[in-house]
Amino acid sequence: MNKKILLFLMCFFALGMTVNAERIDDDRVQSIQDIGNLYGVTYNSGECYVVDSGLDIVAGPYKTVSDYSGYCYAEDYSGNKILFDLDGTVIAETDESHDVQPPQNGIYVITEIKEQGDADFSVYDYATKKELLHTKGLFNYHLEQQPDKMFIEKDGKYAIIDSKCNFITDYIYDDVKKRFNPEYVPFPKAYAIVVQDGVTKYIDWNLNEINLDDYNGGFFITNCRHMYGNDGFTDYGDYYVLESGNRQALYDMASDKIVIPYQTEYEFMQMNNKYIIVKKGDEEAVLNHSGEIVVPYKNQRLSFTDDGLVAYYYYDGETGHDGVLSPENGETKEEPLGNMGYFYKALGETKKENITHGTIVSGGKAADIRSEDLRKFLDVYWNFANYERVIAPLDAYYNIDETYIKLWNKDEKRSYVIYNNSAIIVGQFGEQTQSHGTEKINYVWYRPAVSNGANALYNAFEKVRHTYFDKQYEGYFEAQREITEDDRANIPTNNILPIDGADDWAKPEIQRAAACNLLVYDMTGKYRENITRKDFCRLIYRLVATEFNPSSDSRMGCRTVIQDVINERQMSDKVNSVYFSDCVDYEITFLAAANIIFGMNDGTFAPEENITREQAAAILYRTAEFLGNKTMFKPEHGTHYDDNKSISDWAKMPVDSMNAMGIMKGVSEKIFEPKKYYTVEQAVATLLRMYECY
């Protein structure tokens, strides 16, 4: 039996729980799953049991016991399904031909398992177990956020019912394009978009049809999104972009005001604490928060830098120009854009004429690209593509060996591979290492920025593919041949992790952390610097995402994984309730909602303050608790350090626990120095050790 299970059992015995005949046999336990107020216990034999907090068996044995949205869900050896309430009583039991969905909005549903056609289903009141409705059709009640009005489908038609399954309308709708507030929490009961008699209609909460050009009944939106910062993910304040038909407005939740009225002239792209980047057609401009233009419209690509300036790129027909400008005085300076790069920078070539020929590989065949097709392809990529550096393992991107375009320079001494998602690998990020039973290796990629530019690149790539591999394509050209060794995509083996400046003891662990997808790239030049509270959170956030999905990439993958975690653990309300007056950051918001980090007593987070060693130990300890699959050492006595009195009471257990687990040691065997600041390289090393524990 592993240490985690042993400690779990010892914990309950230490609480003085009484033993009876229905208690689980700890010598036979293989695994324990925490499910709401209950546990799913699996024996070595494969038998599963539902167990309460006192380790008494509630029910079993079963074939499986699993977590269904926080409720215990079991299947017996005959195929029957049983759903347990939080207190261990049975909510519902079905035979093998039906399934039961857990309670939500005060109801639960038993559905017929059917591959095609309308399925038989019944809706029950959760409190009374009374059947409210029995019919055939489709009822995705778990998609609905408003329990008072929900859509139900039958024979391809939709009706609206209330929480007690009383019909508010008959089956009068052909389709439902938007349900009442499926995701826009700040604007409850905002809208629904339906199709009735072939006509698209916008209806408000009272089912009145809305004319979007003349509506004064309050917020009625057809789309809504949080306004983001420069990284494309970090929420900026409480600003929301509201869309009503083809109009957009900017709304400030904090003041409950529309700060920029509905208009059709431009769309909102990014913002910081002073300015907003907007786009009109192919042109971009910068507005202040009053809607006044401070950087004129131009065929250019804009983004905010960390110091509040505006990075720009434009092509004048001959040369690409990039640099930064100040919105306040208009001063410009052409210089490299740091983390932002463009296609020619990713390749390392300054002129596209240096790339003279290319080959496309797809479906086990190759084809040489004609010069005119290559020129058109490069024109799109060279001048239009806004590339970003992304850190990701090899398997984070699909079909890397199946379809790609390989380019060569004039003397054929250099080649470049562009994959069918427009990604380019430029090197390894860290030295290959063994971890979790597999070889870990991470790579530096360049990928298009998330924008319409990505679509343009996709279309350019697909045009080449169709030209040489799609016989039905109007411009098809027969040029397929067998693949040669020169055509193959060779994965770069050069390690381009910046390691200068790190202490010698830390370099091996930094290399391994990078290979395991745990290192944030822009911290690579700061190894000996004290780490800020914000940067430590960024590392913790990356660790959590990587634990749940080792292939999560640094741009979109981590955010996607964390959103899955939020959904699985039903944390959305808690995430939405987190607020710090001096910091609006998605990563910090998530960690605060997960009880991994806390702010100051005055409602601030102090993101730029340096973190102390005892603060780091406490955050690491709570991270281990959140991940939940780690043997947690909880000492019965105080820490063994000679400076124990200097350690805050709230940090004593985390400090000793992290030491016992081998994650975070003292500065010496007997000295911890709790108030001393933590460095970046120390933080990276401890995060790697925690990762290795799982």
Image (spheres, rainbow, N blue to C red):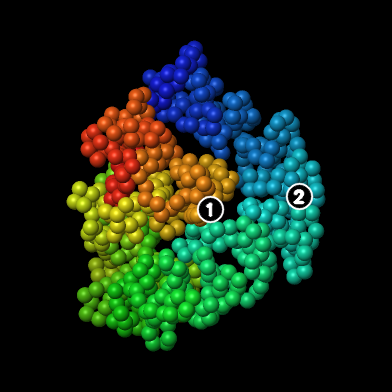
Residue 160 is labelled as 2
Three-letter residue code for mark 1: Ser
Disc number lying in front (1 or 2): 1
Identify which residue is drawn at 23% across, 58% down. Answer: 501
Residue 546: where, in percent of width, then height?
A: 39, 48
Residue 212 place in picture, x, y as percent: 74, 67
* Residue plotted at (79% across, 54% down): 206
**420, above or below 507, in the image:** below
Query: Would residue 409 appear left or right of 250 to someone viewing this image?
Result: left
* 627 vs 494: above or below: above
Instruction: Looking at the picture, tell me which residue is in the foreground, 73 or 610.
Output: 610
Residue 581 is labelled as: 1
| Residue type beneath disc 2 | Ile
- Side of 83 where 643 appears, left or right: left
Q: Give the Cα separation between the discs numbered 1 and 2.
A: 41 Å
Quarter the C terminus occupies: top left
With respect to residue 341, does 491 lie above or below?
above
Name the residue at 35% across, 55% down: 520
Seen from the viewer's position, the closer of residues 630 and 297 is 297
Which percent across, then down, holds residue 308?
A: 45, 68
Please tell me which of labels 1 and 2 falls first in the chain. 2
Name the element at disc 1.
loop
**Regarding mark 2 in the picture, which secondary structure is present there?**
strand
Location of residue 190 by image quarter: bottom right
The quarter of the image holding the N terminus is top left
Vertical comparison of 526 with 506: above or below: below
* Residue 439 appears anywhere in the view: no
Which mark identifies residue 31? none
236 displayed left or right of 358: right
Q: Nearer the viewer, residue 363 or 600?
A: 600
